[in-house]
Amino acid sequence: MNSTQKISHIITETLFNLGCRDACISPGARNAPIALSLSERFDCYNLLDERACAFTALGISKFKEVPSIINCTSGTAVANLFPAIIEARMSEIPLIVITADRPKDMINRGENQTIYQENIFNKYVLKYVSIDSSLQKIKETIYIAYQTAMGKSNNQPIHEKGPVHINVHLDEPTISNKKNTYPTTNDFKPIKINTLENNIKINDINKPIIICGQSNLNQYKKQIFKLSDKHNIPILSDISSNITGHPNIISHYDLYIDKIEFDTVFRFGKKPLSKKLNQQLVKSKNIFLIRNERVFNDDTNKVLSYNQLSNIIDNNSENLTTDWIKSIQKLEDTYLSNINSIMRKTNQLNEYSAAYQVLNQIESNSNLFIGNSIIIRAFNLLLSNSLKKDVNIFSNRGASGIDGNISTSIGISLCSKSIHNYLILGDQAFMHDIGSLKILREVDINLNIIVINNAGGGIFDYLPILNNDNKVNYKKLIRNDHNQTFKKITEAYGINYKKIENISHFKLPKTKESQVIELSVDKDDSLNFYKNLIS
Ligand SMILES: Cc1ncc(C[n+]2csc(CCOP(=O)(O)OP(=O)(O)O)c2C)c(N)n1
């Protein structure tokens, strides 16, 4: 058992011994160890939408008058519990809310799906406690939380019953006994202008890279390209940055980043999607974040404004030789030709072939909202220099929730009635926000929704530790396997529906009418295809 499993086990056993029997669980990777542990002892119910999950637990607690457990992952998932927690507090119903969180020292660093969960429910819980691997007294903490939910102290009733919040900081579920390599950080940092940085000499730097992370950087395109052009610096760009269509862009770096030894980084926007690149960044000392505003949710402390960047570009006339960028482009070409040859001839229907087709077929000046999970990774992998079109890419990467993807893209479409609007997302993200189809029907917009139905949260198949131990509970509680298709529900909302079962039949609609296109994907295909693609 690693520390994460140990904590989960103690929580489960303590609550079980106190008499709790029911747990409502929403799926996620971070809470997976807790969910799987609860499933050993509790009657577990899996509910994709955290709002509904929390209300279901409320119903159980109302009926049984003992606390039921709510368990969900980190990020916006936690915020979705709020309405039921408010109801529980105001109607004095006992609930034990267990949210999974990142280790404390990874918060406020721009890590994926990481928000400020500490005491998030404030007045609406009777008690907030946090647990992490350093805490010795987990049993005692859980006991006190349970007693508080029951309105008791030392077994004596002293106040009303109500919800309590236990926030559990867990290490990466896929890595056991991992030593933390992150330095500590302060709260919000004011922008730090270090005048020394104005004197950066590009020719002191041998192997620089530019990283365009998960923010829309469209307005900075010119400056980014100028820096790259003048000094032959490769641009590692995320699809959500909208930095596309330049020959110095390196798209497939995730496949070989461990082979690149860079010495300086010019970072634009939020951190990149690639886990491997982020791990490399932790080790690098020479990182400059280019940003005019104060630093938010980031651990970089060398910050340059865009004016300072311009000075650096203008004051350094010596160009770097092209050797460095050429060495990376050579690697890129090797992977690119392999990927292209697979993508050109595949007739398999999965996230990758869908992303490839969308990139090829989409018209310039269209809006494309990419949902979270496998699909954004597929786009990121396949985005290549060939995307010369000006497509406006959108995504919700601030907290990477799978909630609200339909409604966010409806909002974008409302502002863009004269151009084509597309949303592409997974079946779970689609189901999470399905009620928004009603708005789609009622407003005068065009939005084509492409749902990749791989019968659950396919992303979790990519995390080996999750699907090895307990297949049945993995499928039920984490992957959330299902056999739903979306024809009836889509048509019930009065929206046109089309099903695609063969990628060669997939045509990106160019009409201005809204519709849902469901792509039926073999749920075992995606991971195998990906492995082949990157081999
Ligand atoms: C609101 C919210 N709840 C839970 C999660 C955790 N989570 C991340 S990906 C995922 C599954 C997504 O499934 P789907 O949309 O079908 O995409 P796929 O994984 O199949 O690509 C879940 C539950 C989250 N990010 N946001």
Image (cartoon, rainbow, N blue to C red):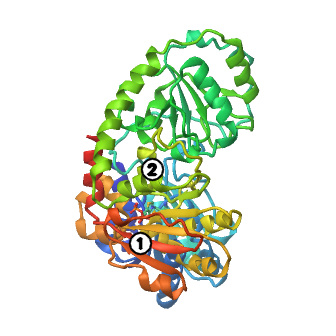
Q: Is residue 377 above or below residue 385?
A: below
Residue at the image point whose x is 49% and y is 47% from the top: 103
In the rendered image, which quarter is residue 35 located in? bottom left
The residue under label 2 is 379
Q: Is residue 97 above or below residue 242?
A: below
Mark number displayed over residue 443: none
Rounded to the nearest angstrom, the CA distance separating label 1 from label 2 is 18 Å
Q: Are marks 1 and 2 in contact (CB under 8 Å)?
A: no
Q: Is residue 16 above or below residue 197?
A: below
Image quadrant, ligand 1: bottom left
Residue at the image point whose x is 37% and y is 25% from the top: 330
Q: Is residue 37 visible?
A: no
Q: Position of residue 261 (x, y in %)?
A: 42, 22
Q: Secondary structure at mark 1?
A: strand
In the rendered image, which quarter is residue 334 located in? top left
Amino acid tagged 1: Glu
Mark number displayed over residue 518: 1
Q: Earlier in the sequence, mark 1 or mark 2?
A: 2
Side (left or right) of 456 relative to 282: left
Amino acid tagged 2: Phe
Query: Dot 1: few (<14), some (14–19), or many (≥20) neighbours within 10 Å?
Result: many
